[in-house]
Image (tube, rainbow, N blue to C red):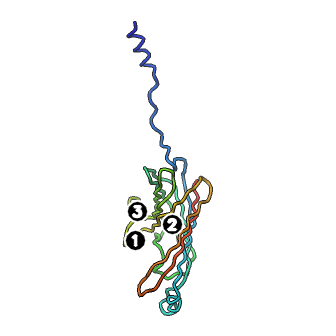
Amino acid sequence: MLLLLSTLALAQEPAEAPAEDTGPFEKITSFSVSYDVSFDMDGTGDKMCLITKICDCKASYTASGTKIAEDAGTVTFEGSFTAGETECYPGFAFWTASDGTAFHTLSFDDDGVIDTWVVHGERDNSAKLPEGIKAGRQYWIDELGLTWKKGKPATAAQSGSGDIGSGLQLGNTHKAVFTFK
């Protein structure tokens, strides 16, 4: 009798529920980005602008997408990445597909803080390319440190400068406003 009661008790224990995906992007279905970048030549570069056509400039881009995958530490969207108004030297232009379509992969930490945004032309080409970025149909920016909330715009901004050859310095400022829905 005791064996029968034990067997019945075991049979009525609820089965363990499968683990749910509770990642930071679980309830996110889409995103959009308004992205502005500016380039600022140093004084010598400014003097050479009329000759080289490499001058201070600004460019804007827009992006959007629908979530197609979420894995540990990354989320991928399929959508668009298009250039808006620009006055920049063509060498400063970022890769955009001729039809505007693109994939976007965001890398994030356990708290959902976004570190890297990779725009890529093929779904499986999301690893940051160290060189040949435009030819590899990519654009990326990292060290974003972007914290966000669903439905609220979140801004990541960066500035830096570097030598572009012959001792000329080029400053750059990036501002991306992300919204997740």
Mark 1 to mark 3: distance in Å? 13 Å
| Circle 1 residues within 10 Å: few <14, some 14–19, many ≥20 | some
Judge whether 20 appears above or below 85 on screen.
above
Q: Position of residue 59 (x, y in %)?
A: 55, 76
Q: Quadrant of residue 11?
A: top left
Spot the residue most to the top.
1
Judge whether 40 appears above or below 137 on screen.
below
The residue drawn where x is 51% and y is 78% is: 171
**Element class at badge 3:** loop
| Identity, as a three-letter code, of the amino acid under mark 2 | Phe
Q: Where is residue 109 in the image (x, y as percent from the top left)?
A: 47, 53
- Circle 2/circle 3 CB separation < 8 Å: no
Judge whether 114 appears above or below 88 on screen.
above
Residue 133, label in figure:
1
Image position of 151 (left or right of 76): right
Image position of 69 (left or right of 37): left
| Circle 2 residues within 10 Å: few <14, some 14–19, many ≥20 | many
The residue drawn where x is 46% and y is 51% is: 70
Spot the residue most to the right.
152
Q: In which quarter of the image is residue 32?
A: bottom right
Mark 2 to mark 3: distance in Å? 13 Å
Residue 81, label in figure:
2
| Identity, as a three-letter code, of the amino acid under mark 3 | Glu
Which comes before the other along the chain, label 2 or label 1?
2
Which comes before the other along the chain, label 2 or label 3?
2
| Identity, as a three-letter code, of the amino acid under mark 1 | Ile
Mark 2 to mark 1: distance in Å? 15 Å
Q: Position of residue 9 (x, y in %)?
A: 44, 16
**Element class at badge 2:** strand
Residue marked by disc 3: 122
